[in-house]
Amino acid sequence: MSVVLMENVHIAPVVGPEIPSGHIHVEGDRIVALGPGPAPAVPGATRIDGTGCLATPGLVNTHHHLYQWASQGLAQDATLFEWLVALYQVWAAMDAEVVKGAAGAGLGYLALSGCSTSSDHHYVFPKGRGDLLAAEIEAARDVGIRFHPARGSMDRGASQGGLPPDVVVERLDDILAATAEAVDAYHDPSFSSKLRVAVAPCSPFSVSADLMTEAAALARSKGVRLHTHLAETLDEEEHCLAQVGLRPVDYMEELGWLGPDVWFAHAIHLSDSDIDAFARTGTGSAHCPSSNGRLGAGIARVSEMLRRGAIVGLGVDGSASAELTSLSGEMRQALLFQRARYGPAALTARQALEIATLGGARNLGREEEIGSLEPGKLADIALWRTDGAFASAVTDPVCTLVFGSRQPPLARLLVGGETVVEDDELRTVAQDELGRAGGEAHRRLMRLAGERGFAAGKEVRS
């Protein structure tokens, strides 16, 4: 069994007091011990000198759309609904090759920002374009981080009062069959799992009530989690009121979609009673500040949600609505957005770190395994170099990590005790090749969309 010893490091475990100069003892994929002072002598151990570094749990990304790496920079000044209408037809052209290249680049970029676990919400499945879910799972295995693909779906197109065009929706029976197949084929519930599947109809304005209730029943019969978008914009609230006579959270409650096995993306436009319902039922949410700002959707009431006991994690959202957004940078964005709205005491640096780690683990139902540095938990550890020449004027390393507009160098990222990043370089895959594959995925998608008449027209620019 491999042994890794980090020492001389400032440890921010998220749970419990920080250790200004201490060690972390890893055996296999688990943390065995951590504490002040030097590491024990263990023959054959790999010793990592963390002098000048901050150790945190690996960051946890709880909302993303990896395929969107291939459609960045489009519809730059659009609202959410305008942006979706502009891009649905482009996404309808994607194939497995596009998804593999986009997912690899997106996951590599996340790893370089300290992310050890990422979910992904993939909800567009054009017919005859290959196995898109398998493509992104293969990319995640190559990069080496934990992966939680959420098999998404849409069954309510424009002809049935939904927002997406009919070309990108699926039949209810086909969705349920494909989702069940994905769970059976890929979901690994084990403690050390690097692959778990969730069930994830897309949004209240693109799926039917039948799909929501049937998907919930399917997920609960198989013991997996539920995810969808919710309360992202006021347009969505108006749509729900017009279609079903209920606000989004009330609609979800009526459909049986509140509970400790559910987490929602965004959850911006919540009332006090909505937040209390989340806290009461253990329902989680993924806060995506950069995407929310890019689309002008609003600022989630994160500070109030935390104060009332609701679960909040962090997400970068799809790359096409938050171009080149790093997960580490979202901690700063979350902090600044809350302070801009509620004042300088609204969110602390350590609260921002907690929602990026343990909050995310709670969203994914993995708080017993990841999200904090504790003996017995998985050795998912980010080691940040906070003693650089310019950073040296800041004596609080957590402040350096969260407040700074530039991410500190990532000295090491361990996932299950294995090195994924070292000295800001991916070690599991060829970094430059991964980036080029992401660029090629973009060019391929634009070419395929162009063949359908949607390459660079007004529909894309909005």
Image: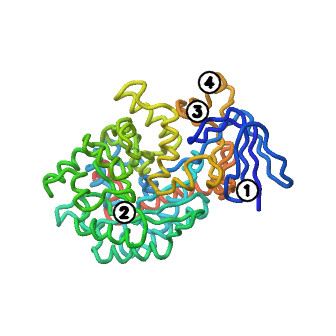
Q: Name the one closer to the observer, 380 or 420.
A: 380
Q: How far is the residue under mark 3 from the one under mark 1?
A: 26 Å
Q: Residues within 10 Å of mark 1 (few under 14, many from 20)?
A: some
Q: Is residue 354 above or below residue 150?
A: above
Q: Residues within 10 Å of mark 4 (few under 14, many from 20)?
A: some
Circle 1 — which element?
Answer: strand
Circle nearer the N terminus (2, 4): 2
Q: Name the one closer to the observer, 253 or 405.
A: 253
Q: How far is the residue under mark 2 from the one under mark 1?
A: 35 Å
Which quadrant of the figure contains the N terminus? Answer: bottom right
The reply to whether dot 1 and dot 4 touch (C-beta < 8 Å) is: no
Residue 125 spot, x, y in % from top left: 37, 68
Residue 301 spot, x, y in % from top left: 33, 38
Q: Which residue is pictured at 69% across the width and 26% down the height?
A: 389
State left or right for residue 8 relative to residue 360. right
Circle 4 — which element?
Answer: loop
Which residue position holds label 2? Answer: 200
Which residue position holds label 4? Answer: 394
Q: Name the one closer to the observer, 289 or 130.
A: 289
Which residue position holds label 1? Answer: 27
The reply to whether residue 109 is visible in this rendering is no
Residue 56 spot, x, y in % from top left: 61, 42
Residue 50 spot, x, y in % from top left: 73, 39
The quadrant holding residue 9 is top right
Circle 2 — which element?
Answer: strand
Marker disc for residue 398: 3
Q: Residues within 10 Å of mark 3 (few under 14, many from 20)?
A: many
Q: How far is the residue under mark 2 from the one under mark 3?
A: 34 Å
Q: How far is the residue under mark 1 from the one under mark 4?
A: 33 Å
Q: How far is the residue under mark 4 from the one under mark 3?
A: 10 Å
Q: How far is the residue under mark 2 from the one under mark 4?
A: 42 Å
